[in-house]
Amino acid sequence: MSANKTGLLLNWLIAIAVIFVLLLTVIFFTLSNIRQLSIPQQIQYGIQALGTLAMIFLGLALLVNAYYGAKRAQALEKSAIAAEKNIELAIQNAKLSQERLTAERFMTAIAQLGHEKSETRTGAIYALERVAQEFPREHWTIIEILTAFVRENAPIHHHELMREENVAPLDFDKYKKDNHRTPQIEVNTPYELPKIRTDIQVALTVIGRRNYLEDRENQKINLRNTDIRQADLQGANLENFDLRGCDLSGADLRGAVLVGADMAGAKLFGAILYEANLLKANLRGANLAWANLNRANLSSANLRGANLTSASLRAANLQGANLYKANLQQATLKVANLSAAKLFLANLQGAKLGKANLQLTGLIGANLQGANLNGANLQGANLNAAKLQQTEIYFANLSEASLAEADLHQANLIGANLSQAVLYEANLHGANLMGANLFETNFCDVKLAGAILTGVKNLELQQITTALGDRTTRLPDDVEAPTHWRQSS
């Protein structure tokens, strides 16, 4: 017991002794005085004195009990404080120990990334993933380590590319001489792609399924110029990734999130991008030949100069996309949404655009030779100077479309809606417009030699008086050919 505690207890004992002596003195004087009283009075005073004494002792007992109770409470409080401090110290020690252990795991995993055995490297990648999950503050560092690992171990190489003739623009005139049928592009079977390394695949899987909420703002994950052909990235989150110059040929990107990703110059030959989200992605100059983009979201994407030869884009969303000078030879765009897209000077030779939505789309100078636009919606589209030779446009909606100087030589426009369309100086030589709706269609200086207009609807004589037809032009029975047509040879 400390000196302070001993002194305090001694003071209490002295105080109790003094009170006890005072009580005895009071009792002694009281007893001496009551002798002069009668016996009944003495008894009464004695009882009162004993009651008072009992109350005093009871009060003293309560005081002593309260004192020791307070002392016990104080002792318990001190014990609790000490226990709390011990717990805090234990937690701190545990944190230090855990951080030390994490640092050891971290350094060990990093060291093992350079191990010669693939199994060891794979285990190290999973160890880093666990550290990132348990310690979010290390998340970005670990992602940067893993991307650096991929860049170092899978750099882009100038591997064997497809032969140039596989994707070269088709010469339809030359092809017609060799083949007396509808032109088709002959494309060789894709070359065999190498299998991706296991540790590289694991690193990409971990990166793709990371907790993206821990990513640093305004910073992109860099996988630039990497060779990750045939990578499995199904459902991976690659939003805002830097994938410029990356080779993803044959990669599986089904359902992947590539919103805002920079894929300029990337190779995606034969890649699977079914239902992938490429909203506002940059695919300028990218190679997407033979890629599967069915139901993909390419809204507002930049595909300027991209190669989409024989790519499949069924029901894809290309609303507002930039496809300036893009190569879409033999591409399948059935039921695709291309409204307000920019397809200026794009190559759509032999493309399949049946029932596609091309409303208000810009197709100035686009090459649609031999394309299939059956049932497509081209309302208000700009097809000025477009090449539509031998194009199938059955029952397409071309109302209010602009086809000035467009080449529709031998195009098939059976049942098409050309109401209020502008065909100024267009070439419809040998075109078939049977059953087409020509309400207020502008035929000024349109070449109609050999064209078939039998069965057309809403055609007025004044519409064709400024057109350039001849005796070979077939008109409806109720419309007489202009005089200068009959005079021409």
Image (cartoon, rainbow, N blue to C red):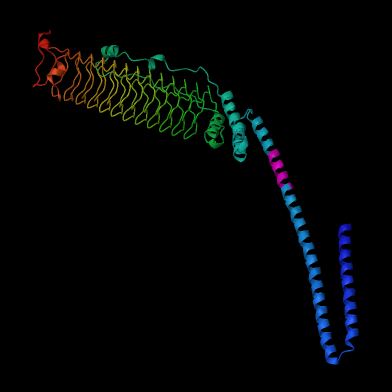
Secondary structure that dominates the magenta span: helix
Question: Is 266 part of what is drawn in magenta?
Answer: no
Q: Is residue 119 among the parts visible in the rendering?
A: no
Image quarter in which the N terminus is found: bottom right
Is residue 422 something one can see in this rendering? yes
Above or below, comparing residue 182 to residue 120 in the picture = above
**Residue in view at x 79 percent, y 69 percent:** 65
Q: Nearer the viewer, residue 434 or 418?
A: 418
What residue range appears in magenta? 89-100
Q: Is residue 4 left or right of residue 443?
A: right
Q: How far from the left and from the top, in percent, is residue 223?
A: 54, 25
Q: Position of residue 255 (x, y in %)?
A: 44, 34
Q: Is residue 210 above or below residue 401?
A: below
Snapshot quadrant of residue 127:
top right
Q: Position of residue 326 (x, y in %)?
A: 38, 19
Residue 462 quadrant: top left
